[in-house]
């Protein structure tokens, strides 16, 4: 069976690493593990990523994309989600079947009130004067997500503005850190996560991603300490157990490696 790496799905589906992380964390896709602890995605996963990316490109917020796909899975349509026609409609996720269109989140049917009379006059409205809109941290966060694929530098600036507007926005730190790691700016990612901790923004995702950035930058012992900090906050964090097991094995601590691997096997099916 053909499988795809993280880089493959980013290239083929055009999806950002943060979207991949979000869909994996939500359980929409459950990748296998390949050599070197790398994710391996199926062809069906790839199609789901392409669907998610097309919705994001149509300005559907990430949280709506995830909620809608999870709801469709829960409905149990009797066929895979990749066989359903899913489209964006005015910022929402719409599904089309033989009976028409309906909203994925609510199940409400979408009525088509468009007149067939194409000769009807078009009413032109006077343009509205532009107004200044104050964007909050989450607004800036969603703008940054939309920029990741086509303009990573502008996405980075938007994430930093989101953090400045809302210093407690964990997702902004996580996504920005992943963006920095994608650009091999591992030390910058480490500094970012450390700044979150200095501000009192703590949690399993912060600790886990800090550990990944430390590991990528070659600080194995410090990375291992952060994986343990993540596990202390979330004992069922399967990936943290897996990475801790791998690093313990690398430094020759086989007993602790086995212990964490057993914990990984215990919790991984729950994802």
Image: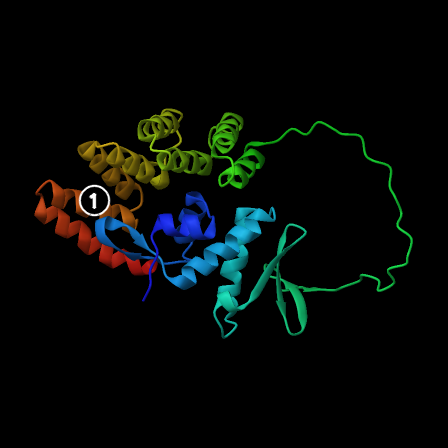
Q: Is residue 7 left or right of residue 117?
A: left
Q: Residue at x 24, y 58 (%)?
A: 266
Q: Nearer the viewer, residue 15 or 262?
A: 15
**Residue 235 visible (yes or no):** no
Instruction: Give x and y (percent) for residue 222.
Output: 21, 32
Q: Residue at x 31, y 27 (%)?
A: 187
Instruction: Give x and y (percent) for residue 160.
Output: 48, 27
Which type of secondary structure does the marked residue at label 1 adopt?
Answer: helix
Q: Nearer the viewer, residue 190 or 206?
A: 190
Residue 6 sits above or below residue 72 on the image: above
Instruction: Give x and y (percent) for residue 88.
Output: 62, 55
**Which quarter shows the N terminus?**
bottom left
Q: Residue at x 32, y 31 (%)?
A: 186
Give the colouring mode of the picture: rainbow
Residue 97 sits above or below residue 189 on the image: below
Instruction: Give x and y (percent) for residue 83.
Output: 52, 69
- Residue of label 1: 244
**Which quarter shows the C terminus?**
bottom left
Q: Nearer the viewer, residue 149 or 203?
A: 149
Mark 1 crowd level (few <14, some 14–19, many ≥20, 10 Å Cα): many
Q: Is residue 118 left or right of residue 112?
A: right
**Residue 63 visible (yes or no):** yes
- Identify the image quadrant of residue 223: top left
């Amino acid at each position: 069976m053909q499988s795809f790496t993280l880089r493959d799905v980013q290239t083929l589906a055009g999806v950002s690493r943060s979207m991949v992380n979000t869909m994996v964390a939500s359980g929409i896709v459950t990748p296998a593990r390949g050599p070197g602890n790398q994710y391996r995605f199926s062809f069906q996963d790839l199609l789901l990523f392409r669907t998610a990316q097309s919705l994001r490109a149509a300005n559907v917020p990430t949280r709506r994309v995830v909620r809608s796909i999870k709801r469709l899975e829960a409905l149990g349509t009797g066929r895979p989600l990749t066989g359903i026609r899913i489209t964006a409609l005015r910022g929402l996720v719409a599904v089309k079947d033989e009976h028409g269109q309906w909203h994925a989140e609510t199940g409400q049917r979408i009525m088509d009130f468009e007149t067939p009379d194409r000769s009807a006059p078009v009413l032109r409205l006077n343009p509205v004067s532009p107004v200044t809109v104050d964007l909050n941290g989450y607004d800036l966060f969603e703008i940054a997500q939309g920029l990741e694929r086509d303009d990573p530098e502008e996405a980075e600036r938007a994430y930093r503005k989101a953090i400045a507007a809302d210093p407690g926005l964990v997702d902004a730190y996580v996504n920005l850190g992943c963006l920095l790691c994608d650009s091999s700016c591992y030390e910058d990612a480490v500094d970012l996560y450390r700044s979150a901790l200095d501000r009192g923004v703590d949690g399993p995702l912060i600790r886990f991603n800090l550990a990944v950035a430390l590991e990528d930058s070659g600080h194995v012992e410090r990375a291992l300490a952060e994986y343990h900090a993540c596990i202390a906050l979330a004992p069922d964090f399967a990936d943290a157990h897996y990475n801790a097991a791998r690093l313990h094995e690398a430094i020759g601590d086989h007993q602790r490696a086995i212990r964490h691997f057993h914990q990984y096997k215990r919790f991984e099916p729950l994802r």
